[in-house]
Amino acid sequence: MDKLLISGGIRLDGEVRISGAKNAALPLLAATLLGETPVTLTNVPQLKDITTMIQILGNMGVSVVIDEKCQVEVNANTLTTAVAPYELVRTMRASIFVLGPLLARFGEATVSLPGGCAIGSRPVDQHLKALAALGADIQVENGYVHARTKGRLKGARFVFDMVTVGGTENLLMAATLAEGTTVIENAAREPEIINLAGLLSAMGAQISGAGTDTITVQGVKALQGCTYRVIADRIETGSYLAAAAVTGGRVKTLDTDPFLLDAVLLKFRDVGALVTTGPDWIELDMQGRRPLAVNFRTAPHPGFPTDMQAQFMAVSAVSEGTSTIIETIFENRYMHVPELNRLGAKIAVDGHTAIVSGVSELQAAPVMATDLRASMSLVIAALAAKGDTLVDRIYHIDRGYERVEEKLQSLGANIRRVTGREESQ
Ligand code: UD1
């Protein structure tokens, strides 16, 4: 199993290109199922989760062509079976995104129920209730969701019990081909929803209100292919800015969008970083200073994203003063805390609250990644820690960070991948 070996204590300095957003590319790939002609997506990141989604499409007989410029062309007309099997779904919860489009376009879908995951139980009840509200017949049997509709889905008003990004995306995709009007209330407002609505509109869907908590969709009979770009990864962007902050360094993130992460940039300014932005770049300069403690609570967009909580906690770990962090989205998203404490951090957790007493220096230790964002928080902390840190189970990081060690090396970090083969020698 691969590991990352990091010799910390180097101030990062340089520029890094941000990849397309995994969390935008996944629903966009699922949405290609709705097109009567091929859809081409550009700026698709090369990541394990993207490969999994492409395998799910390929397994259904859908033709997928990937070129060397990360463009992915999908032709859903070759679909032979509307089934997403457990073997693939269990490795990635976002597989559930195919449910809505399959049902809307082909009238049926059989998708394995995703299991729980390290950060929480993460049920899909809202996805199923939303599709049932459009008239789908939904049965859950032997770990599979079987969804069917006689004729087209029927537009309806649906109010989500909680703000759910994936639930909003599944319903939005299904509603595009429903008969009549669908009104989605308590909709998620994440930039990835706007990106998805943008693709669907370019395919011919009639959507208004994406990016607000009420989205209205006038169903149409068919959607066509187009070429569409995946937005920049705001979480990858924030993670590299956190790496600059923790090392007292300067990092300029390129091909990104400052409007995607307002709440995070505000917190970086509060820790004392000099943050400057242009139309497609963000630079954070810590000017050699130690960050100051700040408090934050995660919330649906435009609040502070839960996907940045772990990485920002690594910054808090070395900050001057005590930070209070409250996680409100997932019930078990502090798995990185014991690992950060192994690196010398002083973090106590009580329920949803983490109290971080900043220390002036972290020390290297072997640590283990537990989930995607947690693994990046360990890498960020290791960049500031004195000595050599070995981060184990980095397959988590490969799910969501494209060429992470190359990008950090280009910023001056001393980091390398230790392969399983090298270790056994
Ligand atoms: C997406 C992101 C993930 C991010 C999360 C919150 C993708 C591929 N993943 O996940 O990186 O951390 O948004 O910003 O885009 N819930 C239910 N029932 C449901 C659906 C959700 O109870 O049917 C709960 C979840 O357990 C969680 C909360 O709602 O507590 C929010 O989850 P949701 O927004 O749906 O997250 P995902 O779409 O799975």
Image (spheres, rainbow, N blue to C red):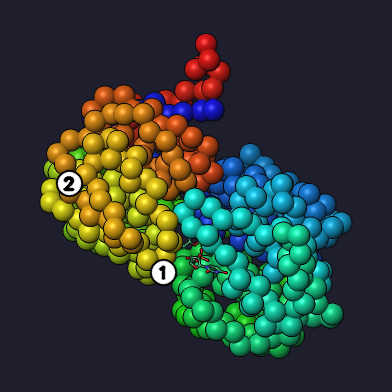
The verdict on label 2 being within 8 Å of ligand 1 is: no
Above or below, 405 against 345 in this view is: above
Q: Nearer the viewer, residue 25 or 347?
A: 347
The single residue placed furthest to the top in the displayed view is 425
Percent position (x, y) of residue 35? 75, 65
40 left or right of 293?
right
Dividing the picture into quarters, in which one does residue 96 lie? Answer: bottom right
Q: Amino acid at mark 2?
A: Gly
> What residue is rendered at 47% in x and 46% in y?
371
The residue type indicated by label 1 comes to Pro
Q: Is residue 308 visible?
A: yes
Q: Quadrant of residue 130?
A: bottom right
| Of marks 2 and 1, the one in the foreground | 2
Query: Badge 1 local density, few (<14 within 10 Å), some, or many (20+)?
Result: some
In the image, farthest residue toward the right? 80
Kindly identify which residue carries mark 2.
Answer: 358
